Amino acid sequence: MSETTSGGVTDVEAISAGVDDMYEAFLRGDRARFDAHLHAEVTVWETHLPGPLRTRAELDAYREERDNSGARPVLDGLSARDRRIDVWGDTAVARYVLVAEPPGAPAEHSRVTDVLRRTGGTWLIVHHHSELLGP
């Protein structure tokens, strides 16, 4: 079930647009814009991360260390494909395949599940899980 939000956009459309905006922000190196899609208490579980990151503060510490070491990924493209988004009131789940395109290398595919909560009229990711599937 998906309700219509202000401006005639459905919740599913708003969440889908938020996913696109988040990855566009990553490509542009705009951390503030990327983080605007994350709840302060987001948990992040990804194949390449050093264990689960249980808060935004832990995520920030990881990113600072990564970026300061010069290891921030550089990508030609980053896109969510094969989306399925379901909404139940103020809770939603978005599932998709994330395709990361490193320069001069084969694309990497990850299976992603994001759990979102509507907070103050905005959809925020409260849990992000990503599993690398391979090229």
Image (tube, grey):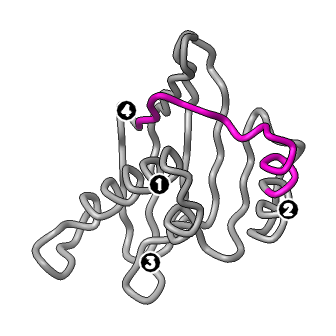
Q: To which quarter of the image does residue 14 belong?
A: bottom left
Query: Is the Cβ of the residue at disc 2 closer than 8 Å to that at disc 3?
Result: no
Percent of width and height locating residue 79: 41, 35
Percent of width and height locating residue 31: 59, 62
How many angstroms separate mark 3 from mark 1 (CA)?
A: 21 Å
Q: Which mark is residue 61?
A: 2
- According to the picture, the residue beneath numbered tag 4 turns out to be 81
Query: Is the Cβ of the residue at disc 2 closer than 8 Å to that at disc 1?
Result: no
Name the amino acid, label 3: Arg
Count of all numbered marks drawn on residues in the image: 4
Query: Is the Cβ of the residue at disc 4 closer than 8 Å to that at disc 1?
Result: no
Percent of width and height locating residue 115: 54, 59
Q: Is residue 110 left or right of residue 8?
A: right
Name the amino acid, label 2: Ala
Q: Secondary structure at mark 1?
A: helix
Q: Earlier along the polypeptide chain: callout 2 or callout 1?
A: 1
Classify the position of the C terminus by image quarter.
top right
Name the amino acid, label 1: Ala
How many angstroms separate mark 4 from mark 3 (CA)?
A: 23 Å
- According to the picture, the residue beneath numbered tag 3 turns out to be 118
Q: Secondary structure at mark 2?
A: helix
- According to the picture, the residue beneath numbered tag 1 turns out to be 25
Which residue is nearer to you in this view: 101 or 1? 101
Q: Secondary structure at mark 3?
A: strand
Instruction: Provide the residue span drawn in magenta.
Output: 64-79
Q: To which quarter of the image does residue 111 belong?
A: top right
Q: Which-is-in-front pick, marks 2 and 4?
A: 2
Which residue is nearer to you in this view: 76 or 41? 76
Name the amino acid, label 4: Arg
Q: Secondary structure at mark 4?
A: strand
Query: Is the Cβ of the residue at disc 3 closer than 8 Å to that at disc 1?
Result: no
